Amino acid sequence: MRSLIVEDDLVSQKLMLSILRPYGSCDVASNGEEGVRMFREAFEGEDAYRLVCLDIMMPGMNGQNALKAIRDIEQADGRTMLSMAKIVMTTALTDIDNVGESYRSLCNGYLYKPIRRDDLVRQLKYLGLVEDL
C-alpha cells in the first residue's frame, strides 16, 4: 500500500511514518499545496496513493481544502467512491463543524490527535487497506 502523509508537524510526521511503513511505502508532504501536487503526480503516474492521511490545521492550503482538491482530481477522472483513495483526517480538531465538513467532502475516516497506533491500524483494517501483520 502506498501512503501519503500530509502533516506540517515533524513529530506527527515521524509518528505516522512509524505506524504506516510496515504496510508499504510512505511519502510526506508538509502542507496542503505540496500534498495535492504529490497526489496529482502519483495519480497521473503508475503508482497512485491508496491512503492519504490529512491534517486540517496547516499553513497555506489547509486539510479541508486539500481534501476537496484531491477528490476533484479523482472525480474529474470519473472515479467513484469505490475506486478513490482512502482519506483519513488526522487532526486535533474535534468540533462537529470540521468533522461534518470532512465527511461531506468525502473523507473515509476521522482520527483525533494524538494519533494512537491501535486507532490508526483499526481504521486501516476497517477501510480494507490492511490485514494483521
Image (cartoon, rainbow, N blue to C red):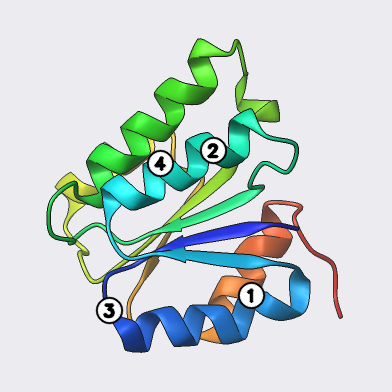
Query: Tag 2: Cα neighbours inside 10 Å, few (<14), some, or many (≥20)?
Result: some
Identity of the amino acid at label 2?
Glu
Q: CA distance from mark 2 to mark 1?
A: 21 Å
Identity of the amino acid at label 3?
Asp
In the rendered picture of this protein, how many numbered marks are placed on residues?
A: 4
Residue 40 pos. (x, y %): 49, 35
Left or right: where 116 falls relative to 42: left
Reading the image, the residue beneath label 3 is 9
Query: The residue tagged with tag 3: helix, strand or loop?
Result: loop
What residue is rendered at 61% in x and 82% in y?
A: 19
What residue is rendered at 46% in x and 86% in y?
A: 14
Reading the image, the residue beneath label 1 is 20
Reading the image, the residue beneath label 2 is 41
Q: Which mark is residue 37?
A: 4
Frontmost of labels 4 and 3 is 4
Q: Earlier in the sequence, mark 4 or mark 1?
A: 1
